[in-house]
Every structure is written in structure tokens, then in C-alpha cells.
Amino acid sequence: MLKGFTHARLACGCLIGFREGVEGSPVTIVVEGKAPGCVSPLHVCNLPLFDHREALREPTRLLAAEEGEFEEEG
């Protein structure tokens, strides 16, 4: 399934790896090494950085109501 890249380095210096996904997710991206200078709290070593399944779930927050049309005051 995975072809080409197996590892990459982010701009912050963290090393990520690409792994086979599960349950409909083609690829899971895992932080394999956190850089000493990285300030992102989302980059935790050995935890997935992005899982495609999360993007497919229904939103848990209510969406903002659409605003109606505005009439010009004249």
C-alpha cells in the first residue's frame, strides 16, 4: 500500500513516519521523533499526528447559523 516515502522531517524538526492505516484509513502519520526545539503540543512521540478516519467523522460541534440577507437602508 505504501509506495515511496517512509519518513519525512517537518519544518519544526520533528521526524514523522508513514504507516499502513486501519479500518478504511489508507495511511497513518506517526511522530517518530520530537525535535528538542519543537513548540507544538500536538507533536507527541509515537502518537499519530493525523488519522484520516478522524476527518471522516461527523462534526461534534454545532455549525454556526447562516446569516440572512441584508436589506439596504434608503
Image: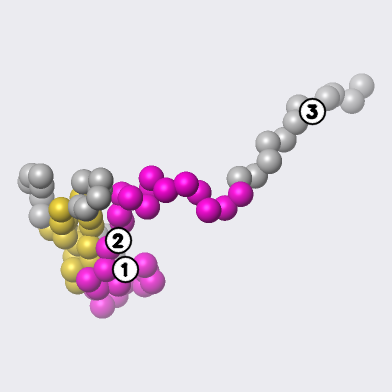
**Between marks 1 and 2 in the image, the one whose residue lies nearer the viewer:** 2
**Secondary-structure class at tag 3:** loop
Q: Are marks 1 and 2 in contact (CB under 8 Å)?
A: yes
Q: Are marks 1 and 3 in contact (CB under 8 Å)?
A: no
Q: Nearer the viewer, residue 62 or 44?
A: 62
Residue 29: percent from left, percent from top:
23, 57
* Above/below status of 29 relative to 59: below
Q: Main secondary structure of the magenta part?
A: loop
Residue 20: percent from left, percent from top:
15, 53
Seen at 10% across and 47% down, the residue is 2
Q: Is residue 57 magenta?
A: yes
The residue indicated by pointer 3 is 70
Seen at 68% across and 36% down, the residue is 66
Badge 2 or badge 3: first in the primary sequence: 2
Q: CA distance from mark 1 to mark 2?
A: 7 Å
Q: Is residue 74 magenta?
A: no
Q: Three-letter amino acid code at disc 3?
A: Phe
**Can residue 14 be seen by looking at this rendering?**
no
Q: Quadrant of the N terminus?
A: top left
- In the picture, the disc for residue 43 is 1
The residue indicated by pointer 2 is 49
Residue 58: percent from left, percent from top:
47, 47
- In the picture, the disc for residue 72 is none
- Please identify the quarter of the rendering in which residue 13 is found: bottom left
Q: In screen coordinates, is 29 left or right of 7? A: right
Q: Which residues are magenta?
A: 34-62
Seen at 30% across and 72% down, the residue is 44
Badge 1 or badge 2: first in the primary sequence: 1
Say how many tags the image has. Answer: 3
Q: CA distance from mark 1 to mark 3?
A: 44 Å
**Between marks 2 and 3 in the image, the one whose residue lies nearer the viewer:** 2
